[in-house]
């Protein structure tokens, strides 16, 4: 399974409080997202701060994409929603 992440900017989705980003799995687009709670708990974002959530995503992007890659492999390429529990306790070093 070939997994690539697109370099385009992430987007905030207020309907479910996530930051969304895209992957290509074997050439097919697959939506991925991380909850703002996970960004706050592990990547230093502050509550109710859209710009902060996006900055935290950008700073933690390599780690976030690595965890998303693992879940894409486990789920055989189905959409991924990363939550706080997908990361080790405490702040992730970026």
Image: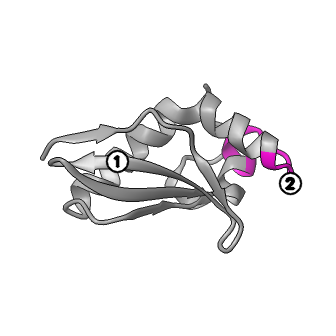
Q: Which mark is residue 89?
A: none
Residue, disc 1: 23
Q: Is residue 75 in sight in this rendering?
A: yes
| Image location (x, y in percent) of residue 70 | 31, 48
| Image location (x, y in percent) of residue 86 | 50, 56
Q: Which mark is residue 47?
A: 2
Outermost front residue = 8
Outermost top residue = 94
Q: Which residues are magenta?
A: 40-50
Q: Report the coloring of the rendering.
A: one colour
Q: Tell me what residue is drawn at x 67 percent, y 44 percent.
A: 42
Q: Tell me what residue is drawn at x 41 percent, y 49 percent.
A: 22
- Judge from the rendering whether residue 59 lies leftward or rightward of residue 74; answer left or right: right
Residue 71: which quarter of the image?
bottom left
Q: Residues within 10 Å of mark 1 (few under 14, many from 20)?
A: many
Q: Residues within 10 Å of mark 2 (few under 14, many from 20)?
A: few
Task: Name the mark nearer the viewer: 2 or 1.
Answer: 1
**Nearer to the camera, 43 or 15:** 15
Dot 2 or dot 1: first in sequence order is 1
**Nearer to the camera, 2 or 66:** 2
Q: Kindly report the distance in space between the C-alpha atoms of the residues bearing marks 2 and 1.
A: 26 Å
| Image location (x, y in percent) of residue 56 | 69, 37
Is-magenta flag for residue 49? yes
- Judge from the rendering whether residue 55 lies leftward or rightward of residue 69; answer left or right: right
């Amino acid at each position: 399974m070939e997994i690539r992440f697109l370099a385009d900017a992430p987007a905030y989705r207020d309907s479910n409080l996530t930051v969304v980003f895209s992957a290509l799995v074997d050439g097919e687009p697959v939506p991925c997202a991380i909850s703002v709670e996970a960004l706050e708990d592990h990547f230093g974002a502050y509550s109710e701060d859209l710009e902060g959530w996006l900055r935290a995503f950008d700073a933690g992007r390599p780690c976030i994409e690595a965890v998303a890659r693992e879940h894409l492999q486990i789920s055989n390429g189905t959409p991924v929603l990363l939550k706080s529990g997908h990361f080790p306790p405490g702040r992730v070093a970026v």
